[in-house]
Image (cartoon, grey):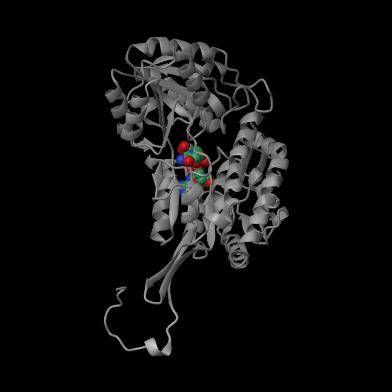
Amino acid sequence: MRAIPHVVNGHRLEEPGRSPVFNPATGEQTAAVPVPGAETVDRVVAAARAGAARWAATSLSRRTNVLFALRELLVRHTDELAALVTAEHGKTLADARGEIARGVENVEYACGLIEHLKGDFSDQVADGVDVHSLRQPLGVVAAITPFNFPVMVPLWMAANALASGNAVVLKPSERDPSPSVRLAELAVEAGLPDGVFNVLQGDATTVTALLEHPGIDGVSFVGSTPVARLVHETASRAGKPVQALGGAKNHMVVLPDADLDVAADAAVSAGYGSAGERCMAISVVVAVGEIADELVERIATRVDGLRVGPGDDPASDFGPLITGAHRDRVIAYVEGAAREGARVVRDGRAATGGPGFFAGPTLLDGVAPGMRCYDDEIFGPVLGVARAASFDEAVSLVNANPYGNGVAIFTRDGNAARLFTRAVSVGMIGVNVPIPVPISSYSFGGWKNSLFGHSHIYGPEGFAFYTRAKVVTTRWPQPSDSQIDLGFPRTR
Ligand code: NAD
């Protein structure tokens, strides 16, 4: 069985594979991921430390040139990367190209590093005294990523971490590890010095080894909520700055004045795109007032037109789930939903089966807190509709949810949208936009159980996270100014 390599110092490092990688469309195992021992972890971290020292001393203009070159290579290799994503993740090629384009945006933002890393200068804060600030890289950053965006999420982290002068050890998901290998190789081709962008394959044990390793200076994590919480606790205990983005249960509130066709199109696109395996997928539509029956009907009609199939078939609207075990878990939620009192309006189990990990689109009506199909992040093509009598009830439902990643409101009433935007305890909000993933010049992150740590990822908060501030107070005294003064220094 082909083993997926690590990448260290710009070269592939082969080890025997242990954790299986599947083609989710066929159910076949195509490769295996090595799970490194302590010696390999030490070797990769040592390479990164040497790389970090070199890279931090590299001029900003040279760093910018490398990032520009990386941007060009990512664009040129989009089809190749997309094929790797589809082969191991299962999403459609069009969707894979979309995530690569969003990742490239982060590199484009990072190309402005000379502006983002600019310090401040205050002249003459006291007689003959000036103050300036600068930001310096953390050192070596561990980037730990989930399976659902094997190119975009590594670039959320790596683009700004590299621009800030850090070295990166990327620990990709063991489910779809191949794109990370190509990313590292393209970074080297772009001119990144040896040891600056390394890939360490592995599983949960590898993550723990990185979190506790003294050679790691900061941790960016994206994944499920229980693991995000654990990663945040472990890294914090080890004294490392950590940002850990977790799972989601995103609501889309539809007010009675909304255009129901627009809302139904948006709910179907955001609910079933990428088989619902997006942290910004809509999983609950909240129908406010008397529109509920009509909205359910319009969504159901659209669901009937969806086609589930292999990601490399242009006719497929969405592909298989990541593993057979995950497919079974998703199906179990659909089975449980009817027992819990929800109405199964469209049943995706009919399209399930065969060797591939396919599940068809399911639409549930009448989901509510206390039902597992409402409370849990299903992460599959299952869209629930909850009903709320009023705007206030819809806001309360959203705010009572323990997750706070994304939310959307569909309405033609600007004031209602404004009130909603101010009232919800959620990090990313869409007004008539169902998947409100911010552009790269803003930062991305949720509230509550969707984010552990204070910092959102990429954008300005990314640069702040990957650097440490220094403030320098300077005086060039003339001998005649010099005197002994035991008082506390004052500026006036
Ligand atoms: P996951 O938490 O299972 O895995 C994420 C990473 O953590 C992987 O690299 C994995 O090897 C590692 N890991 C798994 N278990 C671990 C453990 N016990 N200890 C240490 N490390 C461990 O997540 P996933 O299934 O790959 O990804 C899907 C999840 O990610 C969903 O919950 C989704 O909402 C979330 N997600 C969130 C965002 C966001 O921005 N908030 C973005 C994408 C995905």
Residue 213 screen position, x and y as percent: 50, 62
Residue 68 screen position, x and y as percent: 67, 50
In-image side of 409 versus 485 (left or right)? right
Q: Is residue 146 visible?
A: yes
For image coordinates 45% across by 25% down, the residue present is: 432
Q: Assign the C terminus to one quadrant of the image.
A: bottom left
Q: Nearer the viewer, residue 15 or 294?
A: 294
Q: Is residue 3 visible?
A: no
Residue 448 screen position, x and y as percent: 35, 41
In-image side of 65 versus 293 (left or right)? right
Q: Assign the N terminus to one quadrant of the image.
A: top right
Residue 170 screen position, x and y as percent: 58, 52
- Give the vertical position of 54 relative to 23 (above or below): below
- Give the vertical position of 113 relative to 400 (above or below): below
For image coordinates 32% across by 89% down, the residue present is: 484
Q: Nearer the viewer, residue 54 or 312?
A: 54
Count the numbered circles shown: 0
Q: Nearer the viewer, residue 14 or 399?
A: 399
For image coordinates 37% across by 25% down, the residue present is: 414
Residue 175 figure quarter? top right
For image coordinates 60% across by 47% down, the residue present is: 107
